[in-house]
Image (cartoon, rainbow, N blue to C red):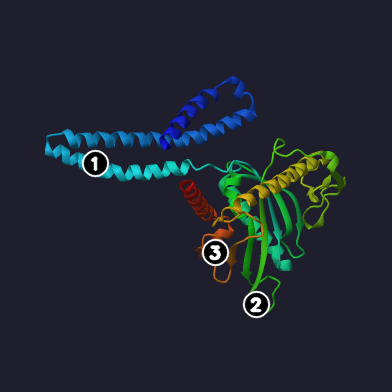
Amino acid sequence: MMLDKLESIKERFEEVSQQIMQPEIVSDSSRYSKISKEYKDLGRIVEQYTIYQKLQKDIAGNKELISTEKDEDLRDMAKEELDELLPKLEIQEKIIKELLIPKDPNDSRNIILEVRGGTGGDEAAIFAGDIFRMYQRFFEKMGWRSSIMDFTEGSNGGYKEIICKVEGEDVYGKMKFESGVHRVQRVPQTESQGRIHTSAASVAVLPEAEEVDVQINMNDVRVDTFQSSGAGGQSVNTTYSAVRLTHIPSGLVVSCQDERSQLKNKDRALGVLRSRLYEMELKKHNDAISSQRKSMVGSGDRSDKIRTYNYPQSRITDHRIGYTVYNLPAVMEGDIAEFIERLRIAENAERMQEGESV
């Protein structure tokens, strides 16, 4: 069954290899982007399948040599080689099985990232700012582009709320594990007695929705304009370029004040609104699935407590996989790739188990 699937993937890869060179596809950036993504994804599988086929061929050749060769030395050499090849085939099979796990179709999307100060007043806003800065450092390491769309500053620094768009390769696929409540344990800057406080920031990672995903009736949207304000309450400009959209059926409210143009702010706010509506539909779908299965990695629900940052002990614990590290300064500088990779492996292991039990 696996081999049949691999053969059909190989055929599709050959088709896509031809399509990617066709002028009508090259000239259409949207189609070319989708075909390029498919070519890359299929290429990874075909490359590993080619290695698997060679191993199979070498194993068959050595087995034949053992059963037919009269020279004992040659038979011994073939046995030695076979002993080396069989474990390699097993490893290769695992690699291919992991590559064949159906990918979340949203993994390749850009995201809207929302970070909010939770319980803990001023300290929560300061921590939300620290978390956002951690992500900015991570985006830089990944070569992703981020742009702030809206923010409300905390009275003692940080952010009560900050929203940004992140663009790059497989952004949602990596960042989706960050959704949830991040808890901090430390002595706040505002604490005079030196006592450790616990506060929290919530993170929401929304896959960026396209117009084809969510149709918005503009008759359902109230548009308000206001003056943009920069850091420290300074006016960015004196025109009413900032935009607030209220989606009446859902009650969702979205603001954008990043651009100097009211039209651009409206377009970007519509993008956030579309993504939030898309996330609501996605949550309904995921809730229906999670009633049948309980994921160890978590639901991606923004109310799940996912990680604790303990400053006195320089300790960070991810509660979903029970993974703890003692290098808090490096993590706050954006060194979160190890957490993401371990969560991805845990999710893949779950999905493989599901596939085997079906």
The foreground one among 159 and 353 is 353
Residue 9: x and y in percent read: 47, 32
What residue is at 70 percent from the left and 35 percent from the top? 212
Badge 2 crowding class, 10 Å Cα cut-off, few under 14, some 14 to 19, many 20 or more, is: few
Q: Which sits earlier in the primary sequence, circle 3 or circle 2?
A: 2
In primary-sequence order, the first of circles 1 and 3 is 1
Side of 59 relative to 315 (left or right): left
The residue that disc 3 covers is: 317
Residue 195: image tag: 2
Q: Nearer the viewer, mark 3 or mark 2?
A: 3
In the image, which disc is placed on residue 81? 1
| Residue 31: mark | none
Cα separation, mark 1 vs mark 2, equals: 64 Å
What x and y, as percent, mark residue 353? 47, 50
Between tags 1 and 2, which lies in front? Answer: 1
In the rendered image, the quadrant that contains the N terminus is top left
User: Circle 1: is it few (<14), some (14-19), or many (20+) Cα within 10 Å?
Assistant: some
Say whether marks 1 and 3 touch (CB < 8 Å).
Answer: no
Identified by mark 3, the residue type is Thr
Q: Which residue is drawn at 52% across and 54% down?
A: 343
